[in-house]
Amino acid sequence: MTFQPGLRRFVVVPLVANMMLFSLMGWLAYDFISALYEASMLSVPEWLQFLSWIITPILWLLGGLMTGYLSTLLVLMLTSPFHALLAEKVEEFVTGEPVSASDGTLAALLEVPRALFREVRKILYYLPMALAVLILTLVPVLNAFAPLGWFLLGAWMMSLQFVDYPMDNHRLPFRDVRDACAARRVSTIGFGGTVALFTGIPFLNLMVIPAAVIGATLLWCEELRPLR
C-alpha cells in the first residue's frame, strides 16, 4: 500500500527526511568510527594486530545499526504530523469511514507542538524500562537474558510508537494505546519486533517508516479498534 495512489504523497516527506538524516548521520558516524578504529588499533599490541579483521566488521556493524536507529527516531519526531495524515488516509481507505483528524497538510503542521509533546511522552515512558534492562545487563548470570530483554523492549516500543498514530487521530490518550496493545500483545510484539529489526538495517530502513505506519493502521483497524 506504500505506493497506492492517494497515499504516495504522504510517504514522500518522511522518505526524503529519512534519506537526508541518514546521509548526515552516516557521514558523522563514519568520522566517529574511523577515529575510534584508529584509536583502538593503536592500543592493541603489534602481535595482536591480526585481530583487526574481527574488530573492523564489529565496529562498522554497530555503527550502521546505531545510525539506523537514531535516524529513525529523529525522523519519527520531526515528521510525526505527516505520519498521522498517512494513518488517517489508510484508515479511510480500509474502512470507508471518514476520520476527523487533521484537515490537510497545513492543519497537520499546526499540530507539530502537540505531536512533539506526545513523542516526549513516549520517551519518558521508555526510559524507566530501558534503565531496568540496563541494570539486568550488569547483573551476572541474569545478563544472559539481557539481549532478549532489549529485543522485547524494542519490539514493544516500536508497536506503541506506530499504533499511536491511528489512535491519536481519534484523540485517544497514550494510556489507551498501551492498553490496546497489551490486549493483543502477541500481535503487537510480532509487529514491533519486525519493525525494530528492519529499522536497524541501513538503506532498507528508508522505506520502513511509511510501511510501518500503514501496517500499524491495519493492525488498529483489524484487531485493536474492535476492542473499543
Image (tube, helix red, strand yellow):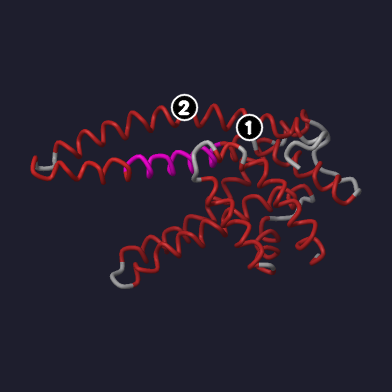
Total numbered badges shown on the rendered structure: 2
Cα–Cα span, label 2 and label 1: 14 Å
Residue at 72% across, 46% down? 214
- x%, y% of residue 216? 70, 52
Which residue lies under the disc numbered 2? 24
Q: Amino acid at mark 2?
A: Leu
Secondary element at tag 1: helix
Which residue lies under the disc numbered 1? 15
133 w.r.t. 202: above or below: below
In screen coordinates, is 180 left or right of 40?
right
Q: Amino acid at mark 1?
A: Leu
In screen coordinates, is 203 left or right of 104?
left
Main SS of residues in magenta: helix
Task: Name the residue at the bottom extreme.
Answer: 141
Q: Where does the magenta region start and end? A: 59-74
Residue at 77% across, 30% down? 105
- x%, y% of residue 92? 86, 46
In screen coordinates, is 205 left or right of 41?
right
Instruction: Report if residue 22 lies within the magenta region.
Output: no
